[in-house]
Image (cartoon, rainbow, N blue to C red):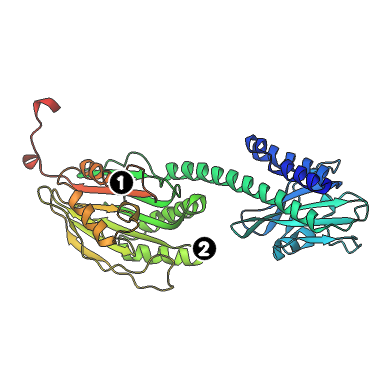
Amino acid sequence: MADSAEKLRRLQAVTDAALSQLGLEDLLRELLERTLDILQVDSAAVLLLDQDGTDLVATATAGLGLEPQHVVRTPVGAGFAGQVAVRGAPVAVERVGQSGDFDATLLPAGTTSVLAVPMLSSGRVIGVLHVSTAQRRSFAADDIELLQLVADRASLATQARRSHLDRAAAVALQRSLLPARPPAIPGLDVAVRYVPGAQVGVGGDWYDVFDLPSGHVGIVIGDVAGSGLHAAVVMGRIRSALRAYAMETDDPADVLTRLDRKVQRFEPDAMATAIYAVLDPTLSTVTLSNAGHLPPVLTAPDTPGTLLKLTPDLPLGAYRGAARRDTRFPLEPGQGLFLYTDGLVERRGRGILTGLQRMVDALPPGSADATCNAAMTLLDNTGPTDDVAVLAVRRDLPALNRPACGSAGA
């Protein structure tokens, strides 16, 4: 009976709901302090995997008597904690040898016994939690089970905090890369919209419009696979590289070929779809190249829009040396392009063709801003599950053909 009561006390100490009210640093520190008490150990430490997944970084300690004066890093696979991270399973050492395989900075002098467990999130190791004692000790199965419970609680808090920080950083990054107001380009009516996904948060969707020294105008829509901060960072690098290549050539296929080589070399795990279109200086001809993206809509001043029949090339990062082609067609006054990312048209339980047709039917003739406003009506009331970026570009009508303004708008 006493053993059952003690076990219940231990579990309550770790699962106390009051811990949820603490910030990550305070929660980790409190968990470690409680661990010292309930396991009767002399020290405890949490080491978290860094962003690159190569090192464990000391993040919280208790009972050591002296906090580390510098950042302590342990390579994954090296030392005691590094081996635990590789194995992804608890390790207990009853008698520490003199081999130097332990993280001396995080083990007090005179340490004899050590127990460590992995911190897991969705089956993936994100850190290591270890405790130590000066007296020789054989850790029991109940000790290992309890320390794993502490590690699981710490993992949940860590991932929640990281997700919050990643989202905040991704939002800030994406806002810096997606200007709210597109540039004013004579002869063009331009409008954009961006809505972050309700479930996955912001990610790798982007749009861009820019004029070039040659007098041409570049128009881009793209989508980096994935979501969150990593996708947003990759998107930023791809966007900047595309702009740089666009300064060197007015050929969209050439630009995307160079961009694909860059992705293959420096972003080996990334994949992105994109359309890059170039308007000639007279705005009467548009040339575009499609890297695996959904087809744009050709809009008109007084008739419904139509999907352009383009055979897409492979996405960026999909296959080395992928061939890319240009498609050129005239753009009459009042005509334009509507480009979008898949979050606008893809829905669970509905075919993509149905989504595309629904989008085309919803886009009215008129200004670029009216086109974007109409596109936003396609989103569910609860918000999109994926990012949505849309970009409408329309060639201005001659002054004589523009609709007259009514008195209400004067």
- Residue 104's spot in the image, x, y percent? 85, 54
Q: Nearer the viewer, mark 1 or mark 2?
A: 1
The residue tagged 2 is 266
Give the camera-side residue of 46 and 266.
46
Quadrant position of residue 24 = top right
Residue that protrudes farthest toward the front in the picture: 1
What element does badge 2 sit on?
Answer: helix
Query: Distance between the Cα atoms at labels 1 and 2?
Result: 35 Å
On screen, residue 267 versus residue 93, left or right, reads left
Residue 97 screen position, x and y as percent:
91, 62
Q: Which mark is residue 327?
A: none
Query: Of the residues shown, which amino acid type is indicated by label 2?
Result: Phe
Q: Is residue 83 left or right of residue 352?
A: right
Disc 1: which residue: 379
Compared with residue 144, is residue 168 higher up or lower down, i.e. above or below? above
Earlier-in-chain disc, 1 versus 2: 2
Residue 339 position in % (x across, y down): 28, 53
* Residue 410 seen from this side: no
Percent from the top left, x then y, of residue 270? 48, 62
Q: Quadrant of residue 381?
A: top left
Residue 360 relative to residue 110: left or right: left
Task: Name the amino acid type tagged 1.
Answer: Leu
Q: Are marks 1 and 2 in contact (CB under 8 Å)?
A: no
Label 1 secondary element: loop
